[in-house]
Every structure is written in structure tokens, then in C-alpha cells.
Amino acid sequence: MTEQNSSIPHKKPSLPSKNEGLLSYFSTLYDICQEENITLELLSNNWVVRLEKNGQVHYIVGYKFGLNPYAAGKIADDKVATYAVLSQANIPAVEHAIIYEFHNQEAYAIGHNSLGYAKHYLDSHNSHIVVKPTYGTGGAKNYQVKNPRQLVTALSEIFYSHPTACLSPFYKILHEYRVILLDGAERLSYMKTLPDQLAWKFNLQQGAIAEPIPAHLRKSIIELAKRAVREMRLRFCSIDVIETTDHELLVLEINSGVMTNTYIQQHPEEYDKVKNIYRDAVKLMFG
């Protein structure tokens, strides 16, 4: 056995057994590392992944690989900041306006920290908006709001666990699309459809179905995603794009962590393709 191979763990590390998605994801990373002669260790309650090969050490935190610049990743995680960057560059994107907890009296919050401000935003957008956390994925605590009572309830729910929320116009959406890019190249893309006509959140974890993007839209969607990522200076990420009933394409958000668990559950035949995306991301971390 060579010195390089002797550094590989002889048994798989303890993996999270209560979360099937994390188990599958970390198992995939482990298999990649075995195949690429990389030592893998799970740290910090299985949330930090330490990778080592030939004296190089790199880290993955959750689903965030050590490829994106720190500032770019922070912007992508913040829906309001993402909108500010994209709109400044004239890239079509869904508006996100910040609102701070009402007791926040810091100078930066003044004017954006009151129920009056939120009510004005609601009135200015045809009394139909979306309220959601500034940070977060999966559609958790996303609320449609049509009146002041619903507004108060939504903000109370979000402020219970988040210091900020964001306000967005409500769009009538035909479909939502996801594009995964690695160093500017499209590696996976699909359309999200809703099986229930009453549903409105296009999240796979909440029942949306992943299907192929219609051929006549693929180029436009992928080019919009690439424009957004070039402006954001991200190397590995997923981009969500909505198509409105007016057939307008808008960037909804950008995720600096790349999650594919539910997609693989729906499309197990795509496992090798997804595994190779993660493999290439890991190899790029080592140069």
C-alpha cells in the first residue's frame, strides 16, 4: 500500500442516521473521496467536512464547498443583497426589500423597521406580497400576504427566529427552474412543476416535481443563470429562475450551497451525473 493510499480511512465515518438526505449526501462524498484517495472526516456534529490529500486540507460546510469567494457566498445567502447586486447590473430578478425587527433602532434599520413601512409596501404592491426570511432555503416560513392581519402574523412568525425578513411582490408563476453551475458551465438543470393547483411554493421538498426544461426555454434560462453567476463571482451554486404568466424570466434566488437530495430521490437514474458534479467540485478544491 502506498503512503498516499494509507491515509484513506479504513471504515466509513459515523454518518447522520436521522436525516436520509444528509446520509445520502455524505455517503456520496465519502465514496468520491475513497475513489480519489482523499481522506474525509466529519467534524462539528457532522456539519463540517474536512478533506485532506497530499498535505492539502480543504473544507465543506454543509452543502457549501470551498470554491466560492467568501463575500460572494454571503451575498448569495442574503436575498436582499442578491437582488441589489443583480438589479444594479440590470439582470432581471425578483425584488426583495428588507425589514428589520421593530425593536431594532440601529441607524441602518431606521425607516425599514416598522409595521407602517411593511403596510406601505403591501399597499404599493396591489395588496398581495410574499414575506419570507432574508436567509433560508426550502420555502420555510414563506407566506403569501394579502392584508394587514396576515402581514402581522407572517412577520411575527419570522421574527421569532430571524432578525430580518424580506418583502417581495407576488408573481403569478407558471414554472420555476433550477440551474446548477460549476465554473460557469451548466451541469444540471430542470423545471419544477406543482402537482397541486392550489400550491404555490416550487420546492421539491414540499411536493414539486422535477421535470426536463422545455427545449425552447433552455437556452434563455441557462444564459440568465450564467449572467447572474458571472456578476456574483460564484464558482459553484444553484440558481432558481421563475417564469411568470407573462412569460418573463426572473432570477428568484441564488444558493451558494448545492443540494440535490430530493432531486435524486425523484430521479435515481441521475445519481451518477450528480455524483460527478460533486466529484468535479471536490477535485477543483484541490486544484
Image (cartoon, rainbow, N blue to C red):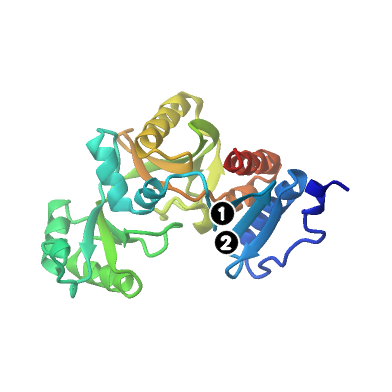
Q: Residue at x 88, y 48 (%)?
A: 1
User: Left of 73 or right of it: where is 10?
Assistant: right
Q: Amino acid at mark 2?
A: Val
Asked whether 28 or 175 is in front, the reply is 28
- Residue 185, how many percent across, how many down? 52, 30
Asked whether 209 or 97 is in front, the reply is 97
Q: Residue at x 26, y 51 (%)?
A: 96
Q: Which residue is mark 1?
A: 60
Mark 1 Cα shell of 10 Å, populated few (<14), some (14-19), many (≥20): some
Mark 2 Cα shell of 10 Å, populated few (<14), some (14-19), many (≥20): some
User: Left of 186 or right of it: where is 92?
Assistant: left
- Residue 256, how many percent across, how many down? 45, 48
User: Toward which corner of the image does residue 21 lie, by quadrant?
Assistant: bottom right
Please report contact status of discs 1 and 2: CB closer than 8 Å, yes or no: yes
Q: Quadrant of the C terminus?
A: top right
Q: Which residue is mark 2?
A: 48
